[in-house]
Amino acid sequence: MEIGLAGLAPTKPAPALAMLRLLGGFQISQALYVAARARIADQLLEGPRPLHELAESSGLWPEPLARIIQALAVEEVFDYDAETEEVRLGRLGRTLASGVSDSVRNVALTWMETHYQPFGHLWQTAETGRPAADLALGMPFFDWLGQKPDRVETFTAAMTDFVKAIRQDAVNAVELDGAHTLVDIGGADGTVLVTLASRYPELHGVVFDLPHVVEAAPELLRAHQVDDRITTAGGDFFTEVPPGDCYLLSFVLHDWSDEKAGHILDRIHQAASVPDARLVLVETVLDRGDAPQIARLLDLTMLGMLTGRERSSAAWRELLAANGFRLDRIRPTAGPMCVIEATRTG
Ligand SMILES: C[S@@+](CC[C@H](N)C(=O)[O-])C[C@H]1O[C@@H](n2cnc3c(N)ncnc32)[C@H](O)[C@@H]1O
């Protein structure tokens, strides 16, 4: 009796095979980097192209590029027809193109150009508790970043791609009824505040970030015609933050240890213009059942690159309470991030 393949139930790969696939992750990451840097996906947005054309326009050798593309075809990034040598986008491929709404190309560049090497020191992080980035770069990550404008530019672009991919549902869920002046702490180029200002036409606000980062914001505010209501301020959130009745921290506190995050909250507590100022956090909450994978991945990023961590609801409650804020509610969203609402106390 013949057993057709169609009759076999799909089985999980053997543990050793599954493990080998995980262990090879660093090779796939680098293959994705080559594709992103060579703008292969950009060149395929209009339709399939012969491999030799892609190689020529990217200045790469056809044979290595073909092997890289075939390895990525297994991961659904590209489709490769070995007979015609034509390449087309696979299910995920579009996200490696620049300028598309769900692009993560800047993440591919930043992770491989700045995060990849530090992660080679993860053993020392486990041994000493120090971030791998400090060991690899010789200084804290944000200090290293600030040394060269092009590093800041690439990182800000990557953050915009990354957070857009995972935080849009949470930003859409932020409720600001009754808020007058919203200060977006660590607001980078103002992307989040621009979205919120469009939804709340009466809202005034300040994009606050390090001086060399916030430089990019005025242009975006002008482009979205909210520069009459939203201003920018450069500074250090460990020193002083602008006054406001509502504070937003999107993807900021997770960068820092409890001690450092406490300093930021303390500066907000001091600067608030009303005693019951509101605090809105856009962050992951580890005890949510869904999408733990991206939150755990982010937690590893924090471990390797900074002093921060992703936090459980209990940890958020404790951190806020220890620094003069009462956690009011955690609102899950359709995406992997939550909106955490808190109020300033005494
Ligand atoms: C992970 S990004 C979040 C960006 C933005 N809130 C978003 O959701 O896209 C963290 C931000 O904190 C800023 N930052 C880091 N250290 C800072 C400091 N000491 N003072 C002010 N901003 C700082 C960084 O420049 C960066 O823009």
Image (tube, rainbow, N blue to C red):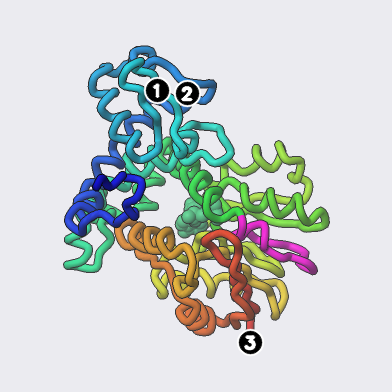
Amino acid at the residue labelled 2? Leu
Amino acid at the residue labelled 1? Val
Left or right: residue 239 compared with residue 29 = right
Q: Position of residue 318 (x, y in %)?
A: 48, 83
Query: In this picture, which residue range is highlighted in magenta?
Result: 169-184
Residue shown at the point (32%, 52%) measured from the top left: 8
Write down the quadrant of residue 185 in the picture. Answer: bottom right
Q: Is residue 180 magenta?
A: yes
Q: Secondary structure at mark 2?
A: helix
Residue 168, disc = none
- Which of pointers 2 and 3 lies earlier in the amino acid sequence? 2
- Mark 2–mark 3 distance (CA, rounded to whole Å): 58 Å
Write down the quadrant of residue 279 in the picture. Answer: bottom right
Residue 87, disc = 1
Q: Position of residue 243 (x, y in %)?
A: 67, 66
Q: Secondary structure at mark 1?
A: strand
View extreme (bottom): residue: 346
Residues at circles 1 and 2 in contact by the CB criterion of under 8 Å: yes
Q: Nearer the viewer, mark 1 or mark 3?
A: 1
One can see residue 105 in this view: no
**Residue corresponding to mark 3:** 346
Amino acid at the residue labelled 3? Gly
Q: Nearer the viewer, residue 63 or 184?
A: 63
Looking at the image, residue 314 lies above or below residue 46: below
Residues at circles 2 and 3 in contact by the CB criterion of under 8 Å: no
The 10 Å Cα crowd at callout 1, few under 14, some 14 to 19, many 20 or more, is: many
**Residue corresponding to mark 2:** 44
View extreme (right): residue: 202
- Which of pointers 1 and 2 lies earlier in the amino acid sequence? 2
Residues at circles 1 and 3 in contact by the CB criterion of under 8 Å: no
The 10 Å Cα crowd at callout 2, few under 14, some 14 to 19, many 20 or more, is: some
One can see residue 111 in this view: yes
